[in-house]
Amino acid sequence: MKLKELKTDKGTIYQCSCCGQVYDELPLTFGNDFPDYYFSIPHSEREARIEIKESLCVVDDKHFFHRGRLTLPIVDRGQDLVFNVWTSISEDNFIKRNNLWNSSERVNEDPYFGWLQTTIPTYGDTLNLKTIAIENEAGLIPTIKMIEDNHPLTVDQKNGITFDKALKIVDFILTSGHERTAEKDQ
Ligand SMILES: [Zn+2]
């Protein structure tokens, strides 16, 4: 752990022990701009082969992805640790999801099966774990529910995590690039 919790007059802040960077609030929402598959396409070919728009992505007109929200409840804080993640989605469901984007009826749809396309830090290899995407009200991306049997991410989503564990995950995400940056500065 590099983030140290400090109590100040203005409340709790977090300071990195390697470089001194201060976080007034602990960020609890993280996201990825692209599905993992995106990075397997060579740089020079991405523009021609990939269509990406907000929470939807199509590669070569045959690989379909969408973005949803994966939350881990922090049981002792009444807050969630949130990851905006990508999953695969079948072509039929992709078309359906597109058509229903503004529909208030879409909450009645069956969940869409998909393979996780985002690495969740500290959970090892999370690519291609089984998920379902559950539609939310119009204007909101779906809720991603982990259904991969016995995976720690599935267990933590179901049972929740402690604030201490959330802090360790956030610490890893925020400070993993720090030492490199600090070395460069010297
Ligand atoms: Zn640091």
Image (cartoon, helix red, strand yellow):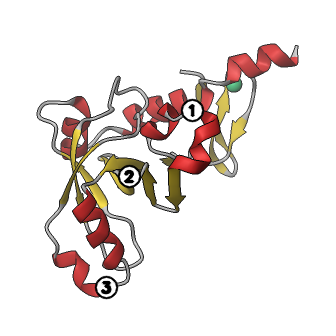
Q: Residue at x 16, y 43 (%)?
A: 147
Question: Could you tell me which secondary element the residue under label 1 belongs to?
Answer: loop
Image x and y of residue 167, in percent? 47, 34
User: Which label is found at residue 42?
Assistant: 1
Give the Cα separation between the discs numbered 3 and 2. Answer: 27 Å
- Judge the density around disc 1: few (<14), some (14-19), many (≥20) Cα neighbours within 10 Å: few
Left or right: 127 in relation to 42: left
User: Which label is found at residue 80?
Assistant: 2
Question: Could you tell me which secondary element the residue under label 3 belongs to?
Answer: loop
Q: Residue at x 19, y 36 (%)?
A: 155
- Quick check: which quadrant has ligand 1? top right
Give the Cα separation between the discs numbered 3 and 1. Answer: 36 Å
Q: Label 3 belongs to which residue?
A: 103
Left or right: 4 in relation to 113: right
Q: Residue at x 59, y 22 (%)?
A: 2
- Disc 3: residue Cβ within 8 A of ligand 1's nearest atom: no
Q: What amino acid type is highlighted by mark number 1?
A: Pro
User: Which label is found at residue 13?
Assistant: none
Image x and y of residue 153, in percent? 26, 35
> Residue 45 occupies which quadrant of the picture?
top right
> Residue 182 occupies which quadrant of the picture?
top right
